[in-house]
Image (spheres, rainbow, N blue to C red):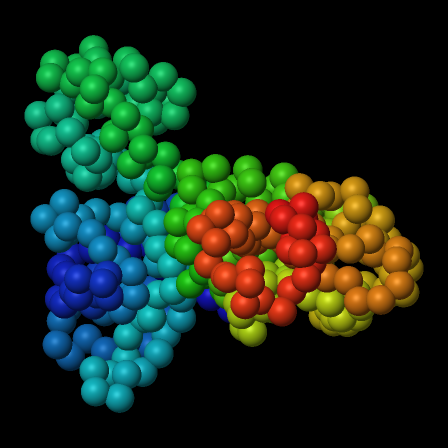
C-alpha cells in the first residue's frame, strides 16, 4: 500500500538530466493529509545521520531547483533501504500541493511561468487565496488586471496550473484501481491534459500505453460502467491483441482464427483476475460482427464468412501498408517481365490497392 507524504522541499541533493533526483524534505504539518502517524513512520524508517531532513528518491523530478526549494509537494511511494545510502523514502509519483497559507501560496504562484515575487503579491492582494484559485480555474483572463501580465503571458500560466491540477486528480482516480503510479506520468504524457476525461469516457484507451495491460483497463472500465456492453469489450480486446502482437512479434496482422482464440483467452484471464464469472464463450459470435461493424478500427482482408485463411489488420496499420504498397507499385520496383506473377495476378493486386 503506497503512502502519501506531504512535504516541503528543503534541498535538491542530487539530480540527473533525465529527472532522477535525491531530495531533502521535511514533513509538512500544515497539509490536510498530515498526521502524527506519518511523522512517527518517518522517524522509524528514515536515517537522519547526514541531514536534519529525511531523503526522498524520485525518478522523474525534472524541475528547476531555484523555483521549487521551499515548495510543498505530496510524494507517493514507500520506505526502502539503499545498500549504499541507507534508509529513504522512494517515491513513484508526486504532485505539487496547493499551500493553505498566504505566504506558502505566494511562493507556489512564483513557480508558475511569468509570475515572480512582485506579481504573486499583487495577485494575492487583489484576489486572495480562494479567489486566485477560482481565477486560475475558471477565468484566467482576469490576470491581465495585474500589472505586467498580458494576454500572451496567460496561456503558459494556465497550462502549468492545469497540469498540476490534472496530476492531482489523475493520481486520486488511478489510486482507486491500484494502477502502478510510475505509469501516471506516462499516461499524462500520452493522453495530455484531458487524461482523466478520456479515461472516464473510454478506459480502454489505457491499453495503448506500454505497461498497461488489457486486464487493468478492463477492470477500470467494468467498475466505471458496471455493466459494460459486450461489444465494447470485444472490440477493445481484439484491438489490444493486435497491438501486442505487433509490438512483440512485429506482425502487422493476425490470422482471423488465431485472433479469435487469443482474444477469448485474454478475456478469460481478465475475468479471472477481476473476479468476473461470465462465460467468455458468449463473446465468440460477437467477434466477427465487431470487426465488420468497426471498420474504423479493423480491416479484414477477405470476407470473414468465406472459407480459407483470412487476416485482420488494425485499420491505421492497413492504411500505412497500403500507402507503402501504392508507392512501390507506382515506382515499378519489380520487373513485370521477370516476375512469376501472371498478368491477372498483377491486375488483381492493382485493384486491391
Q: Position of residue 171 (x, y in %)?
A: 47, 51
Residue visible at 84% across and 49% down in the picture: 289
Residue visible at 17% across and 62% down in the picture: 17
Position of residue 228 relative to residue 13, above or below, is above
Position of residue 247 relative to residue 84, above or below, is above
User: Outermost residue toward the front?
Assistant: 337
User: Outermost residue toward the bottom?
Assistant: 83
Position of residue 4 relative to residue 46, above or below, is above
Q: Nearer the viewer, residue 182 or 22?
A: 182
Q: Position of residue 41 (x, y in %)?
A: 37, 71
How many numbered badges does the structure rendering display? 0
The part of the image, by quadrant, that contains residue 165 is top left
Left or right: 46 in relation to 14? right
Left or right: 16 in relation to 165? left
Q: Nearer the viewer, residue 47 or 213?
A: 213
The part of the image, by quadrant, that contains residue 283 is bottom right
Left or right: 294 in relation to 18? right
Amino acid at each position: 500500500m503506497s503512502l502519501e507524504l506531504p512535504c516541503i522541499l528543503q534541498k535538491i541533493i542530487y539530480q540527473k538530466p533525465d529527472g532522477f533526483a535525491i531530495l531533502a524534505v521535511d514533513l509538512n504539518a500544515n497539509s490536510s493529509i498530515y498526521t502524527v502517524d506519518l511523522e512517527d513512520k518517518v522517524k522509524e524508517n528514515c536515517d537522519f545521520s547526514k541531514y536534519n531532513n529525511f531523503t526522498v528518491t524520485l525518478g522523474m523530478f525534472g524541475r528547476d531547483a531555484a523555483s521549487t526549494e521551499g515548495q510543498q509537494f505530496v510524494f507517493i511511494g514507500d520506505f526502502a533501504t539503499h545498500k549504499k545510502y541507507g534508509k529513504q523514502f522512494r517515491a513513484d509519483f508526486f504532485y505539487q500541493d496547493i499551500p493553505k497559507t498566504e505566504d506558502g501560496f505566494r511562493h507556489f504562484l512564483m513557480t508558475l511561468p511569468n509570475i515572480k515575487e512582485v506579481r504573486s503579491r499583487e495577485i494575492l492582494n487583489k484576489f486572495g487565496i480562494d479567489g486566485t484559485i477560482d481565477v486560475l480555474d475558471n477565468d484566467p483572463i482576469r490576470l491581465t488586471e495585474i500589472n505586467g501580465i498580458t494576454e500572451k503571458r496567460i496561456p503558459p500560466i494556465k497550462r502549468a496550473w492545469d497540469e498540476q491540477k490534472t496530476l492531482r486528480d489523475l493520481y486520486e482516480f488511478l489510486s482507486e484501481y491500484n494502477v502502478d503510479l510510475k505509469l501516471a506520468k506516462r499516461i499524462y504524457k500520452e493522453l495530455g491534459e484531458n487524461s482523466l476525461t478520456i479515461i472516464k469516457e473510454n478506459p480502454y484507451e489505457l491499453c495503448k500505453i506500454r505497461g498497461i495491460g488489457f486486464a487493468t483497463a478492463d477492470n477500470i472500465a467494468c467498475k466505471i460502467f458496471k455493466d459494460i456492453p459486450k461489444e465494447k469489450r470485444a472490440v477493445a480486446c481484439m484491438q489490444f491483441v493486435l497491438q501486442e502482437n505487433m509490438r512483440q512479434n512485429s506482425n502487422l496482422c493476425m490470422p482471423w482464427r488465431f485472433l479469435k482464440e487469443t482474444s477469448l483467452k485474454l478475456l478469460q484471464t481478465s475475468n479471472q483476475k477481476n473476479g468476473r464469472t461470465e462465460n467468455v464463450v458468449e463473446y465468440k459470435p460477437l467477434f466477427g460482427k465487431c470487426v465488420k461493424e468497426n471498420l474504423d478500427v479493423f480491416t479484414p482482408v477477405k470476407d470473414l464468412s468465406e472459407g480459407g485463411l483470412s487476416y485482420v489488420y488494425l485499420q491505421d496499420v492497413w492504411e500505412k501498408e497500403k500507402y507503402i504498397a501504392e508507392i512501390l507499385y507506382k515506382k515499378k520496383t519489380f520487373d513485370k517481365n521477370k516476375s512469376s506473377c501472371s498478368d491477372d495476378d498483377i491486375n488483381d493486386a492493382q485493384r486491391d490497392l
